Amino acid sequence: MNDTQQARPDDLPRATSSTESLESFVDVLDFGLSGATDDEGTGAQEEDDSFTSACPYDQLDIGKVDLLPRERAKELYQLKRDQVAKAILRRMGPKQLLLKDKITFVLGSTCLWVCAFWLGSSPQSFYKLYTGLGVVLFTFRYLVYRARKWHYYLLDLCYYGNTLLLLHLWVYPRSYLLARTTFALNSGPLAFTILAFRNSLVYHDMDKVTSLYMHLVPVCVSWANRWFPEESRFGPRQDSDSGGLVQLVLWPMAFYMVWSVFYFGTIFVFAAERIKRRGYTTLFSYVTTQKRGPFNSISRRIPPKLHALAYLILHCLFCATTMLLSTLTWRSYLAHTTLLVSMASASIYHGGSFYFEVFARRYYSKPEDHGAQHPHLTYSRKPSESGLKPEGGTKAEAKTE
């Protein structure tokens, strides 16, 4: 990945583990304070009183709302932001940071065995655990991504699929249409995205945990509801014959088309200029800047103006193909269980690659320098400029989520 490449947020290797959660904390703080300087806001109409008092009287213009030039307001805001980060780092020395990571690792491991135990002992109620974890993880991700200007990632298909699943679980639990649509999405595109984007089980990394959660846990929910349904809520288990090409491919693709019209209309038409002007990143910008993969080989053979159309076609083919495979998992308990175990194993393998090829080298090299090298102190709004670019990195470092 070169300096000009844009990166998918949860695809970036982290400089250190202990500073990861601290960066997320300050980003949430950034979201709460950014109304005064964010381009999406109302300018400096809501400037903090400290900004107003710092402004010389000769800069005041009664006929204008802005009390400070926008550039100066941003400088003051960035200075305050760095002061907060440094103050937190002074309070948390290397030993405290290491202890914090150990505690986070224990919590992540506990979450894993709780999910496994719940799915095995009470599969018919597993959807309740999925919902509870989802509220926490998605709320945190929204706050962090909004602060980092990565919020257009939240329009991707995986979020749409999770939204449909929650709608089915809590609003229309006996919907014949939603039951099959969510099954096809969860056992199709969402499951195979774990392979496509190398989702990984990395306990201490909230971004990676959330990405894996939103792709793997819906597969667990569909597996539980398909073979061990809570009949009082979802009705009796359906016959295999009730899921064919029409129910598991055509109907879900209709829902996919609704999403694709909204997504591509937003990204490439209505908000295209806004995204470009403000430096926002999207999944499309991530895919189009990768040097490997099927899209790269295709994009070199077509003009740039057709890249968006080519991306749409490839995305549609990927979804249709994986949904076609869901017809097999609907009919076979063995096939569905094999899919679930395979995707879980792949995420564990990706996580192991990250820990042994990336994490160990970076984290344990100089733990005492964590504070001095905290990437947040040289924070950049663009992921590609965050200072976390791999240097002679391995395959796992460049690609593992």
Image: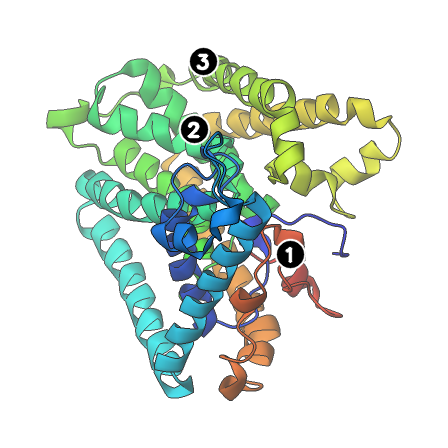
Above or below, comparing residue 1 to residue 98 in the picture: above
Q: Are marks 1 and 3 in contact (CB under 8 Å)?
A: no
Q: Given the image, on which type of amino acid does mark 3 rest?
A: Trp
Relative to 329, 239 lies left or right:
left
The residue pinned by badge 2 equals: 160
**Viewer-side residue, 23 vs 352:** 23
Label 2 crowd (10 A; few <14 / some 14-19 / many >=20): some
Label 1 crowd (10 A; few <14 / some 14-19 / many >=20): some
Label 3 crowd (10 A; few <14 / some 14-19 / many >=20): some
Give x and y (percent) for residue 98.
39, 82
Does residue 331 appear anywhere in the picture? no
Residue depicted at 64% across the width and 56% down the height:
399
Q: Given the image, on which type of amino acid does mark 2 rest?
A: Tyr
Does residue 113 appear anywhere in the picture? yes
Label 1 and label 3: CA atoms lie apart by: 33 Å
Residue depicted at 55% across the width and 60% down the height:
350
Tally the numbered discs: 3
Residue depicted at 45% across the width and 62% down the height:
80
The residue pinned by badge 3 equals: 251
Q: Residue furthest left?
A: 232
Give x and y (percent) for residue 82.
48, 66
Give x and y (percent) for residue 270.
59, 18
Give x and y (percent) for residue 215.
44, 42
For numbered disc 3, what is the local secondary structure?
A: helix
Q: Are marks 2 and 3 in contact (CB under 8 Å)?
A: no
**Viewer-side residue, 332 vs 64:** 64
Q: Given the image, on which type of amino acid does mark 1 rest?
A: Lys
Above or below, comparing residue 333 to residue 242 in the picture: below
Disc ID at residue 399: 1
Q: Nearer the viewer, mark 2 or mark 3?
A: 2
Q: Are marks 1 and 2 in contact (CB under 8 Å)?
A: no
